Amino acid sequence: MMRFDYYKRHARTRLALLAGLVLLPLASVAQDDAWGDDPWASENVSPWSWYGFVEGAAGVRTDENPLIDEDMPLGELRLQVEGEYQGDGATWDFKLDGIADGVEDDFTGNVREAKVSFTLGERTDVRAGRQILTWGTGDLVFLNDLFPKDWVSFLSGRDREYLKAPSDAIRTSWFGDNVNVDLAVLPFREPDVYIDGTRLSYWNPRAGRRVAAPPKLRTTEPARTVENSEAALRVYGMAGDQEWAVYGYRGFAGQPEAVDTDTGRPTFARLDSLGASLRGPLGDALYNLEFAYHNAPDDPDGDDPRVPNDELRFLTGYEREAFTNFNVGVQYYLEWMQDYDAFRETYPFATDERPEEKRHVVTLRLTWRLMRDNLVLGLMNFHSPNEEDSFIRPTVEYRITDQLYFNTGANLFEGQSPATFYGQFEPDSSVYARLRYNF
Amino acid sequence: MKNRVLRTLVIGLGLAATAFAPAASAQDRPSTMEIVKRANQASFYAGDDGRTEARMRIVGSSGREQVRQFTMLRRDGDQGRQQYLVVFSRPADVRGTVFLVEKNPGADDNRWLYLPGLDLVRRIAPGDKRTSFVGSHVYYEDVSGRDIQADEHELIETTDEHYVVRSTPKDPDSVEFAYFDTRIDRDTFLPMESEYVNADGKIYRRMKIEEVKEIDGYPTGVRMRMEDVANGGHTLVQFRYNAYDLGIPESVFSERSLRNPPREWLQRPER
């Protein structure tokens, strides 16, 4: 315990020191006079371009979490360096993050992107390497986008960009006259960055209570073999103003919701998925419709309690500008277990907290852009009427200059039960602030 | 009957004669709508397509400066429809952001935004077009053109150099101005200055073209200033490396270009 406290104090000090080191030069930085340096001339001189940012971020829990001593789920200094090389036939780019982390008390480096993009013939684009992959029509709700997410980053207050975790993938895009095809092959399975109890506690159905680290949640990883590679397909196009898409996926679930028979540890179930979406104008607004059928091939009848059930997911959304610079978006989202009778009969844990057959979620997003978009006030609210839990996410984004950006907000959870999706994070509600300097 | 035919013939010949007369007279001045149409054509429809690089210096009311730099491709369709692709290169945090617009005069535009950090193609809900374009004092509508059918136009003055047209909104609740006066160059038909007047009769916003160059035979405003007269602050826009009639195919204005901007069309023309 002593040792643990020492570490905590040590980490804080280090963080404060580093934050000081960044903020000091920031305060004295003169406005970058991009107008004076004649950017017209500088372009295309070198095939290399360099960018990046330094960001200090801190988040504090709104209440004490009895399971986690650390009262900050977020406290870090991040340096991102981005380089791009425009060759004749291909563009190479990479994004590297270096993080001094005061919560887990370590220095880490992440390769966020390292990819090459090129065109084959007239109609095919290829992007190979580590990259961010996104598709689908949901607003922070994912049905057919089964690419890795980083929920730890998102729920602890990092930039929204970090909700998407990178994949090592080859993405091939073919563009036809009316139909386009995207195929992403992930040779090695890419799971989500799941909540392991270090920054946020979570519901453990086996224990029948919330748990946190130590010990960290440990999972059994499927073998890195060719059979375990993942593939995601999207066939899409436009019909008039309407966008349509059909999706297929073969791989693994992102969350460790299954149980490995040999080790007894959580693991990642096989997942096949098929879905479709529509998006387009509706009067003076936009609508979207999307569904996905998530099939668990290891549990065709739904009676294996170690494997998640088949699930039908459905989403519909509507967004419009309510008045000048003020947008309102609403969504209804359904997760519907398909073999619920079998699930209920074989559910191995206490029945009080057994999930219901359907999970209904409504979301509301309000966005207000002020001061020529330099100040953006946002509110995103997720609420499940049948699970009686909510996730409320107010955000304030302020662009001080082209270089300096201030963000603050909160991730607030509440629920009637500690076993529901948002309810489990209630003790992890937090407020955060971030200051970023772009260069 | 015979008389009437004769009279029509005489009047007809007379009109034809005035039309061919070299000296300026009241009859050969274009109608107000003709002036407005030609001004719209000159500002937003030069050639069948075009490309330009633009940079903006945005000076806030407190004197704080920001910069935007982008390359814009345009292609004209039928009945005033247009497609725009805007690829941002500065500042660092918006670099790689791409904006795709399908402009439908008199109706809502289709708009998409690509955010490279999230690999996300977002469709933007139709909205008020008289709001800031990328944080500047320039409105979306100033970039793509205001629907000429949305206002009543009246020629209030003709000087040696300019036609001065007053445009009054047909739906006053849909806009923030009571009317605006535009000084249109009689030779090039470029709108050289617009002053927006509010309900109190005060000028609160002013657009001025400060430099014109002829490019590929089209007079082009290459330096424009948008001033927030009411609150202070302005945006200076410079256009360079303009080119017209490049033959940009329609397929360039698609999701493909959002994720992978078309270098072939974005690169500077050789001249």
Image: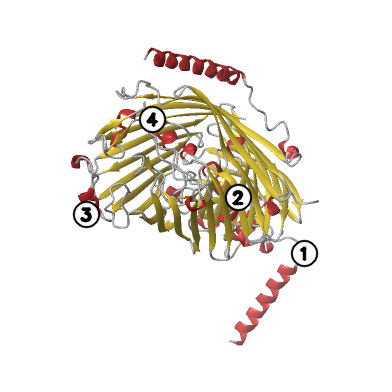
Circle 1: element type = loop
Q: Which of the two residues, A246 or A250, is positioned nearer the viewer here?
A: A250
Separation of residues labelled 2 and 4 (CA atoms): 35 Å
Residue A156 appears in the figure: yes
Q: Which residue of the protein is positioned furthest toward the bottom in this rendering? A: B2
Asked if the residue at tag 4 contacts the one at tag 2, i.e. Cβ–Cβ closer than 8 Å, the answer is: no
Asked if the residue at tag 2 contacts the one at tag 1, i.e. Cβ–Cβ closer than 8 Å, the answer is: no
Q: Seen in the image, is B148 located left or right of residue B12? A: left
Q: Which chain is home to disc 1?
A: B
The amino acid type of the residue labelled 4 equals Lys
- The residue that disc 3 covers is A341
Residue drawn 28% across and 34% down? A414
**On the same chain: label 3 and label 2?**
yes
Separation of residues labelled 1 and 3 (CA atoms): 91 Å
Please rate how many residues cluster around mark 3, counting C-alpha atoms within 10 Å: few if below 14, some from 14 to 19, many from 20.
some
Query: Which quadrant of the structure image shows residue B5?
Result: bottom right
Q: Residue A127 shows which numbered tag?
A: 2
Tell me: residue A360, above or below residue B35.
above
Q: Which chain is home to disc 4?
A: A
The amino acid type of the residue labelled 1 equals Pro
Residue drawn 62% across and 30% down? A439
Q: Seen in the image, is A359 located left or right of residue B257? A: left
The amino acid type of the residue labelled 3 equals Asp
- The residue that disc 1 covers is B22
Separation of residues labelled 1 and 2 (CA atoms): 63 Å
